[in-house]
């Protein structure tokens, strides 16, 4: 079966360092082209010498040899170029957040349905086996009835004032950038949606740089912190009546730390120690797994887990948090 020929709209650093190499390494995929308005794609050709250059996004979309496009553009451009790519007959994998408001998903979902093409948010963690395992443990009752979930994702880019995440006009902010992880991962594992939400948010230059979110899901209490002004940390803990499940490198495994799940269970009253099982996932690249799953869905019609409807649900949660915090 012929590979899926991929094009990339823009020579973003993230695309160059992570997604382009993943496309090149993935089975069933081929990095066929990059559209760069600067005209320089030498960094991509260093590992994919047959990769073609295009001097505009429109030129890449007009090439019938391109089957699918990856969109790493600034957040506020995502919906526009998703629609243009679908109209050009391309399958689309778009960086998160795909839209700045849940209401903006409607046009993209309609275009996906009208064209019959695959369009998805690049929510790579759903393809990582640690998250699939966490979902299986929690939903099978491996830690008993769920009581509390807490999630943290932080880094510090305060010195990088030109970063698009620090600019309101490009859709910046901590919640659009990493709230998709602290929110979406919990929705995925539990299969539940929030009932109530409250938030305390710190703002700089019109973007959120710290957010403490609390609320209730149908069966558990929720707490999360996202920040672009704190020392790097990421962790998600599912705390049940009969055990605790902790992911210590949930979002950037292999970069932040090794992916592993620590599963504590069989805890009784008194001083009896917990039984702890640590499951490690060494050498897994969730970007490659994401591309391979996308290609299978395109070529074989297999189910793709990161649907637009799921992404819309996470964005709806972000919208509600901003409303609860009375965002400016």
Image (spheres, rainbow, N blue to C red):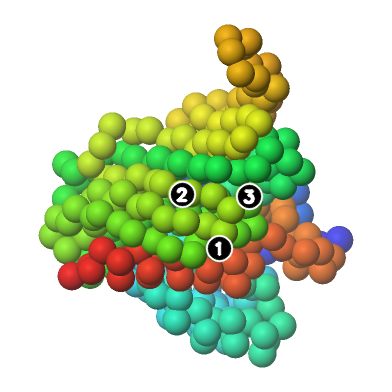
Residue at coordinates 45% horizontally, 81% vertically from top-left? Answer: 104
- Residue 25 lies left or right of residue 324; in this view the side is right
**How far from the left and from the top, in percent, is residue 198?**
33, 59
Residue 190 location in percent, x, y? 63, 52
Residue 35 visible in the picture: no
263 shown above or below 159: above
Q: Earlier in the sequence, mark 3 or mark 2?
A: 3
Q: Position of residue 292 (x, y in %)?
A: 72, 53
Q: Please state, as top left, top right, bottom left or bottom right, where the C terminus lies in the image.
A: bottom left
In the picture, the quarter occupied by the N terminus is: bottom right
Q: Secondary structure at mark 3?
A: helix
Q: Which residue occupies the extreme left position in the image?
A: 205
Q: Which mark is residue 189?
A: 3
Q: Secondary structure at mark 2?
A: strand
C-alpha separation, residue under disc 3 versus residue under disc 2 = 13 Å
Nearer to us of marks 3 and 1 is 1
Please report whichever mark, 2 or 1, sits nearer to the chain's N-terminal start: 1
Tell me which residue sits at (38%, 33%) in the image: 233
The percent coordinates of residue 66 (x first, y second) are 64, 71
Q: Is 229 on the left-hand or right-hand side of 271? A: left
Question: Looking at the image, which residue is at 63% across and 76% down?
Answer: 90
Between 194 and 122, the residue placed more toward the observer is 194
Q: Is 238 drawn above or below residue 296 in the view shown? A: above
Q: Residue furthest bottom?
A: 114
52 and 306: which is toward the camera: 306
Check disc 2 and report the residue beneath it. Answer: 222
> Secondary structure under badge 1?
loop
Frontmost residue, 147 versus 192: 147
Mark 1, residue position: 193
- Marks 3 and 1, Cα distance to the nearest angstrom? 11 Å
For the residues labelled 2 and 1, the Cα–Cα distance comes to 11 Å
């Amino acid at each position: 079966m012929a590979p899926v020929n991929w094009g990339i709209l823009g020579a973003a650093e993230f695309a160059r360092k992570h997604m382009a190499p993943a496309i090149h390494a993935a089975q069933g995929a081929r990095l066929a082209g990059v559209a760069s308005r600067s005209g320089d794609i030498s960094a991509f050709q260093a590992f994919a010498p047959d990769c073609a250059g295009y001097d505009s996004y429109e030129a890449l979309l007009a090439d019938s040899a391109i089957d699918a496009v990856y969109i790493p553009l600034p957040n506020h451009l995502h919906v526009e170029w998703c629609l243009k790519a679908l109209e050009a007959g391309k399958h689309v994998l778009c960086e998160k957040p795909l839209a700045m408001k849940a209401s903006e998903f409607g046009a993209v979902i309609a275009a996906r349905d009208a064209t019959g093409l695959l369009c998805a948010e690049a929510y790579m963690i759903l393809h990582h086996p640690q998250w699939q395992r966490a979902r299986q443990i929690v939903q099978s009752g491996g830690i008993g009835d769920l009581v509390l979930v807490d999630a943290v994702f932080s880094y510090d880019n305060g010195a990088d004032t030109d970063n698009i995440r620090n600019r309101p006009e490009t859709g910046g902010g901590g919640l659009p950038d990493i709230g998709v992880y602290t929110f979406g991962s919990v929705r995925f594992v539990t299969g539940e949606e929030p009932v109530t939400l409250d938030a305390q948010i710190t703002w700089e230059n019109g973007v959120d740089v710290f957010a403490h979110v609390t609320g209730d899901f149908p069966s558990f209490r929720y707490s999360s912190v996202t920040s672009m002004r704190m020392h790097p940390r990421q962790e998600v803990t599912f705390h049940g009546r009969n055990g605790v499940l902790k992911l210590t490198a949930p979002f950037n495994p292999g970069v932040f730390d090794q992916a592993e799940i620590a599963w504590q269970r069989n805890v009784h009253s008194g001083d009896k120690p917990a039984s702890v099982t640590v499951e490690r996932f060494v050498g897994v690249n969730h970007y490659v797994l994401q591309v391979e799953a996308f290609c299978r869905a395109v070529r074989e019609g297999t189910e793709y887990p990161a649907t637009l409807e799921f992404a819309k649900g996470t964005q709806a949660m972000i919208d509600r948090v901003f409303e609860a915090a009375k965002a400016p």
